[in-house]
Amino acid sequence: MAAKETSSVKLSTLPIPQLTSIKNQLTQELQHLTNSFTQLRAAQAKFRDCINSIRDGIEKGGRKEGTPILVPLTPSLYVPGKLASTETVLVDIGTGFYVEKTPPDARHFYTSKVDDLGKNLKDLETIVQGKQGNLNVVEDVLRQRIISESTSSSQDAKGGGGNG
């Protein structure tokens, strides 16, 4: 495997347009990562809801087969139905595939999903913090460059105006 070459550039030597471009790129990356973070949190919350539904609806609820229930078709649309079995539940394992599992196995499946997402969220949070730090540094350097250029151009204008 080839070694990845990295090179570093001193930010203070870059021209303002290039600093602005880097700032914009970091802002876009940060926005994308933040959106991903939000989506992972939402997925984690859905899996937790599944765990609660299994625990409260089947295991603790003491419901029997034939009990009327509301079946979610979408997050905001439910249709009436009847509980077909308390021995097994259908588990969405992704991409439209469902598997029959016992309630404890289903809870274990969803718990492992919540744990995996938690690890991914922790890793993503570290990446977001690093990108945010990089963005702050670039913004500081850009601000300093703009101030120094405006100061030097105003001094040039003052110095050039008195030589007549």
Image (cartoon, helix red, strand yellow):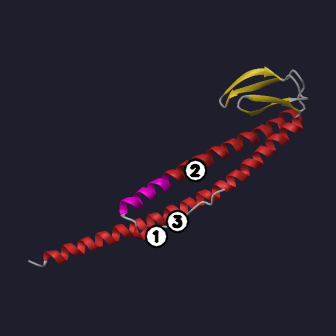
Find residue 149 and report its horizontal and vertical position in percent.
31, 70
Q: How many marks?
A: 3
Asked if labels 2 and 1 touch by Cβ distance under 8 angstroms, the answer is no
Residue 93: image x %, image y %? 76, 34
> Dot 1, crowdedness within 10 Å: few (<14), some or many (≥20)?
few
Q: Please state, as top left, top right, bottom left or bottom right, where the C terminus lies in the image.
A: bottom left
Residue at screen point 42% across, 70% down:
12
Which residue is tagged 3?
Answer: 7
Dot 2 corresponds to which residue?
A: 34
User: Residue 21, position in %: x, y?
Assistant: 42, 56
Q: Amino acid at mark 1?
A: Lys
Q: Give residue 89's quadrant in the image.
A: top right
Residue 43 located within the stretch drawn in magenta: no
The relative height of residue 146 versus residue 104 in the rendered view (above or below) is below
Foreground pick, 24 / 47:
24
Q: Which residue is mark 1?
A: 10
User: Reading the chain from its start, which is encountered first: label 2 or label 3?
Assistant: 3
How far separated are the C-alphas under marks 1 and 3? 10 Å
Sequence-first disc among 1 and 2: 1
Q: Quadrant of the N terminus?
A: bottom right
Depth check, mark 2 against mark 3: the one in front is: 3
Seen at 49% across and 64% down, the residue is 136
Is residue 60 visible to us here? no
Which mark, residue 144?
none
Query: For the magenta stretch, what is the residue range?
Result: 16-27
Identify the residue at horizontal 51%, vertical 67% (top origin).
8
Of 7 and 139, nearer the camera is 7
The residues bearing labels 1 and 2 have C-alpha atoms spaced at a distance of 27 Å
